[in-house]
Image (cartoon, coloured by chain):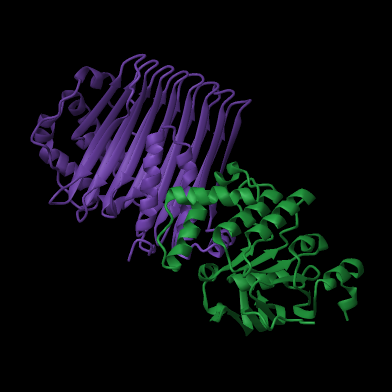
Amino acid sequence: MRLQSDTTKRMLEIRNLHATIGGKEILKGIDLTIGEGEVHALMGQNGAGKSTLSYVLAGHPAYEVTEGSITFRGKDLLALSPDERSHEGLFLSFQQPVEIPGVPMAKFMQTALNAKRKYEGLEPLNAADFLKLMRERRKVVELDSKLTSRSVNEGFSGGEKKRNEIFQMAMLEPRLAILDETDSGLDVDALRIVAEGFNRLRKPETSAIVITHYQRLLDYLKPDFVHVLINGRIVKSGGPELAADIESHGFDQFLQ
Amino acid sequence: MNAATQYIELFEAERQRIDSHAPAPLNDRRPFAAEAFRRLGFPSRKVERYKYTDVSEAFAPNYGLKLDAEPLQADEQLLRKYYGTLANVEADGITALNTMLVQDVVVIHIPANTTKELPIQLTNTLRSSVPLMQNRRLLIIAEEGAQAQVILNDHAEAGQDFLTTQVTELFVGEGANVEFYDIEDTHERCHRFHQVFAQVQAGGRFTHATFTLAGGLSRNQTDVCLVGPQAQATLLGSAITNLNQHVDNNTLIDHRAPEGVSRELYKYVIDQQSTGAFAGRVLVREEAKKTDSIERNANLVCTDEARMWTQPMLEIYADDVQCSHGSTVGQINDEALFYMRQRGVSDAEARMLLKQAFASEVLAAVPLEPLRLRLAALIEKRFRNCEDCKLCKK
């Protein structure tokens, strides 16, 4: 059985990644390779470093990479700014999306989308085409039109915030989506809508890192690989059966 | 020679020319104003309401006095009845200076139960080949049940020094409704002192919104007196500063009658090495029972060099009132900034959107919709012109 992708085209390669926040080391040597079109699940207890890894990939300024490298589609990811990483196709669905009062959701998305188009050498999308695209993508995650006319995430329920993350992913069409506990705070129906929306929106070559505590989301997203992260290191990698194993036996088996 | 002496000498030397240029009611007040100014001089920072602004530098140059060829004309009867009755020269050196030298007056009179369908716009564009001082008066009289919206726009041509003192007296009659907008969009070599005195009668409503988009030293002192029952006042202010700008909004809302309502919201975005100050005093007198008052000042300080002073004040001498006051000083929210950048918005654009968002709350409270939209565009333009913003530079 393949434990890391080796046959498909490589999208992301993480080598011996060490990262700290406020001088405290959280990631202690991560190695992970993700190929085009693959879904990797990342599981582990709270504090293991899952969210840290997603923040480091997205370029959060509070985290410092002290050792190792990250290559994204042949480029040195660590040399790129957070917005350049976004333009290159990296999307992070936040575990706790930030409320930004006073910044209208539509204006924010239009700014983001046109920045990406500019990066790709394309003309900005005109208002009519933008609104049409927004309407279309909103439907996929059944996001109420009222929400896109409000300020970014302001007054959204937990579930609405998560839908809004997937909606934004649909707008930006990333190559690699990192879903950081997108299932938390979602009821069964909302989870299905978000997961099915994600599946409908992704193209065959879209890759994903899915961070979750539960099997439920993985039932929908069908990971190709499952990794167990403990204390800043990947201690075990396997196929989908590993997630089922964790669901019934927990993480204790990996703690030594 | 200190600055105050310079203006007194100017007044004495030019007295005849000044008088011949203005209607009698203005001239009649000058000697009293000169007397008060002689005594008060320019307010030092020891004067409570001026503790956040040093006015001396702005008044130090000798601007002289330039008068138009045409003498001023205004309704003398109205002037006799209203002019100088709210703006007390004994209380403030700058009001006294303005009254002593006033050379420009606009009177807006809305008769009882009349509604002005369209807003009245006053646009001042300063243009001069030499450094210029102007001392202006605005008198707005809205009689019982009258309704009006007045917009004051201040602009200035680049490359020249300008000094403006303006005193505005506003009479809001019983059940009248007056919105007064003040938009200052000049440049760093323009200093402006605007003293607003408003009196609101029973059931009258007064809204005053000040937008300070660009200037050098800007000081707005606003005194509102709610003299009749159920009078309402709303004071809004938005200041966007950079370079060496200094903006000081100093307000007093004086509740003198029962069941008055006052709302105050001032927001500042302070960038680069600019400074801001807000001091707002709400006074609820013993007779002002059931007063309802909310005062809020919030500030976004964008650099380590920028400074903001804030002082909300609430004095209550009446029973059974509902009053609150508060202020905050904060910085750009780093988590919001990162969230936006993750979606592909550049650092500069994200910061601009966050500043705009911060300022938008005051805009949202502006009742006059076309002006709200126009101001939103002006504010965006203002933020994009900031030196640290590279978006417009190709």
Q: Which chain can be seen in purple?
A: B
Residue A174 showing in the rendered view: yes
Asked whether, in this view, residue B43 is left or right of residue B299, the answer is left
- Residue B145 at x, y percent in the picture: 40, 16
Which residue sits at x=83%, y=69%?
A: A243
The front one of A219 and B337 is A219
Number of numbered markers: 0
Asked whether, in this view, residue A52 is left or right of residue A218, the answer is left
Which residue sits at x=47%, y=45%?
A: B360
- Residue A70 at x, y percent in the picture: 61, 80
User: Vertically, is A145 above or below B386?
Assistant: above
Report which quarter residue A40 is drawn in: bottom right
- Residue A95 at x, y percent in the picture: 69, 60
- Residue A22 at x, y percent in the picture: 65, 74
User: Vertically, is B336 above or below B184?
Assistant: below
Asked whether, in this view, residue A124 is left or right of residue B15, the answer is right
Report which quarter residue B171 is drawn in: top left
Which residue sits at x=65%, y=47%?
A: A142
The front one of A167 and B89 is A167
Q: Colour of chain A?
A: green
